[in-house]
Amino acid sequence: MACRLPAVPVRSAVIKTHVVSAQVKFTSQPLARPMVMSMGSIHVITQADVRIRAVTNGRESEGAGCIYLSDLWAWPGSGLSHEIRDAAMRGYCQYLASCLPTITDDAAHPLALGLRLHEAVIAGTPHPAADELKAPDHSSAVPPQLARIVCASPFDAAIHDAAGRALGTSAFNLYAESQPIPQADGYFLQGACRAIQAVLNHPPRTASMAWWIVGKNDDLQKDLQPVVEQFGCFAFKLKIMGQDAHTDARRTVEVAHAARHWGLQHLVLSIDSNEANPDVASVLDYLAQLKRLDQRTYADLLMIEQPTARDIGAHPYDWRAVAVQTPVFLDEGLVSLKTLALAKEQGWSGFALKTCKGHSFTLIAAAWAFQRGLLLSLQDLTNPGLAAVHAGLLAAYMPTINGVELNSQQFTPQANDGWRDQYPDLFTPRDGQLRLPPASLVGLGGGGA
């Protein structure tokens, strides 16, 4: 059963966590239906479950974290097979488990430990003495930056989970008192802890729109109508191909018209080409064609997720002409603290947060954006079980415009077994809504199923 205690702010001026050990195990999860994206299709995915032992302010505890090693999303266009990329990411997770106490080094606030881990994997060599990781039988299969970040994310979550469980409080209550965070304090006038405390919802919200993914090949009557009628879903994320604005606009209108035909009066749409658009002009063309085809559907558009290539330094664009029409969010390109100011300069509306980028980095990016008036959204990586609970808690505390996108029940429902019994309304929508985990949940929910 989940461990729940009264959620009270931690009043100790100093919180120090020391990682003792870490381990990771893997489960291969087949998708109930392929997820079709512009860069390919996902048919099977690896679930990474992390457990750590840590000591926080003299109290020993265990923490847990979970994520899917989505190699197609985190490592596209390499020419390597899924099997090779997946093996390399599993190997990198095992490497991190073996040296996590060394990477995080001496005791510090969980946020500082998470940022040390994030900086290490960004650098590409988590420890100076480490040999270059090589996947079995393929010497060049070293995970790129975003793939390494995904591998590190459940360890970061487990650190925060362990600290919260040691102190008997939510991991979101670790910022009530300011504490030096050397890696991040320079980004804020009053320090990182105060900035994070300022961005958090008080009180946390209890519900979110329930998002449903609409793929390129989905049969709307077969695949979407039951969702509308059974779950009342009205928020849909469309996976478009990004190469033909007219085709993408027609598909968007087709989905909207079908949903209205089935009785929906209120509709919310998100568009995601997964970086397939060649430039800003193609996005503006899509918006113009959508508006010409159906102004009501154009008005239903809540947001666009990263349309162009993830390296926004190598592929810079001015997004202001898009942003004045509909918010455009940086997603795959949001990977480091250095990205934050560059994104604002380029006119991105805000940041698409993801737990797979690391809990610590996500909190810092959210606080930085909030202080500058940028928008926040919270996206998914088909988070299963504990990972979905983690994302649900983040949605409760973060002022995102979309609530949270959770789609494991759509693609890997078997991965939620056990967790669904504890949080049925998190995994099964009612009236188009998901009920978020309670704010009283200790840590990040790792004491659950």
Image (spheres, rainbow, N blue to C red):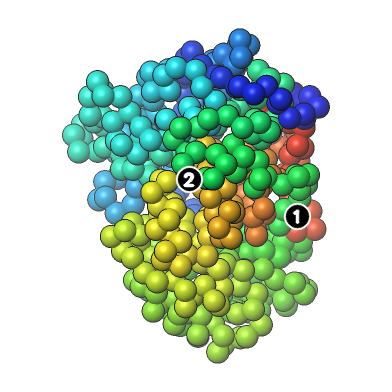
Tell me where residue 190 sits by quadrant. Answer: top right
Give the percent coordinates (x, y) of residue 413.
62, 43
Q: Residues within 10 Å of mark 2 (few under 14, many from 20)?
A: some
Residue 433 is labelled as 1
Total count of labels: 2
Q: Residue at x 36, y 69 (%)?
A: 317
Q: Could you tell whether 256 is left or right of 20 in the image?
A: right
- Residue sitting at the far front: 189
Pick the residue in front: 243 or 35: 243
Tell me where residue 388 sits by quadrant. Answer: top right
- Of the two numbered discs 1 and 2 on the same chain, state the one appearing first in sequence: 2
Q: Quadrant of the C terminus?
A: top right
Classify 108 as above or below 170: above
Alpha carbon separation for disc pair 1 and 2: 35 Å
Secondary structure under the numbered disc 1 in the rendered image? strand
Give the percent coordinates (x, y) of residue 426.
72, 44
Amino acid, disc 2: Tyr
Q: Decide if residue 23 is in sight here.
A: yes
Give the percent coordinates (x, y) of residue 336.
40, 46
Q: Residue at x 72, y 61 (%)?
A: 233
- Residue denoted by label 2: 187
